[in-house]
């Protein structure tokens, strides 16, 4: 609701309004592209670490088929 009050402007000739959240999202995307072009290995390393921790987290909640057979 607060986002509706923080309209920064309207694109001329259209009904498109730029809100504060849109502006922040655009700035974040620009910052990520700047970091990506500056050091692409940093982003790749971060994604690899994220995949690793997601795999560890997902394996924690999976039960082996042998345990499922014994419980049933």
Image (spheres, helix red, strand yellow):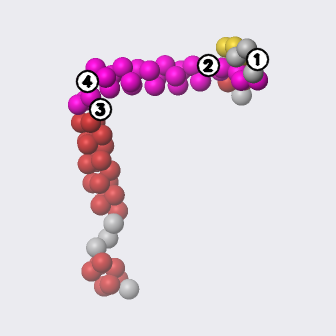
Residue 44 versus residue 11: which sits nearer the camera? 11
Label 3: how many Cα within 10 Å (few below 14, some 14–19, many 20+): some
Label 1: how many Cα within 10 Å (few below 14, some 14–19, many 20+): few
Q: Which residue is mark 2?
A: 20
Q: Which residue is mark 3?
A: 43
Residue 38 versus residue 70: which sits nearer the camera? 38
For residue 50, what is the image quadrant? top left
Q: Earlier in the sequence, mark 4 or mark 2?
A: 2
Q: Earlier in the sequence, mark 2 or mark 3?
A: 2
At a point 31% along the width and 85% down the height, the residue shown is 70
For residue 63, what is the image quadrant? bottom left
Q: Which residue is mark 4?
A: 39
Q: Which residue is mark 1?
A: 13
Work out how far the residue at label 3 is from the one at label 4, CA to CA, in angstroms.
7 Å
Contact check, label 3 and label 4, Cβ < 8 Å:
yes
The image position of residue 11, as x and y in percent, is 70, 16
């Amino acid at each position: 609701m607060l986002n509706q009050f923080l309209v920064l402007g309207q694109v001329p000739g259209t009904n498109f309004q730029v809100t504060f959240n849109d502006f922040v999202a655009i700035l974040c995307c620009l910052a990520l592209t700047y970091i990506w072009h500056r050091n692409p290995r940093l982003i790749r390393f971060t994604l690899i670490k994220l995949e690793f921790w997601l795999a560890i987290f997902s394996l924690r909640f999976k039960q082996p088929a042998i345990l499922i057979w014994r419980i049933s």
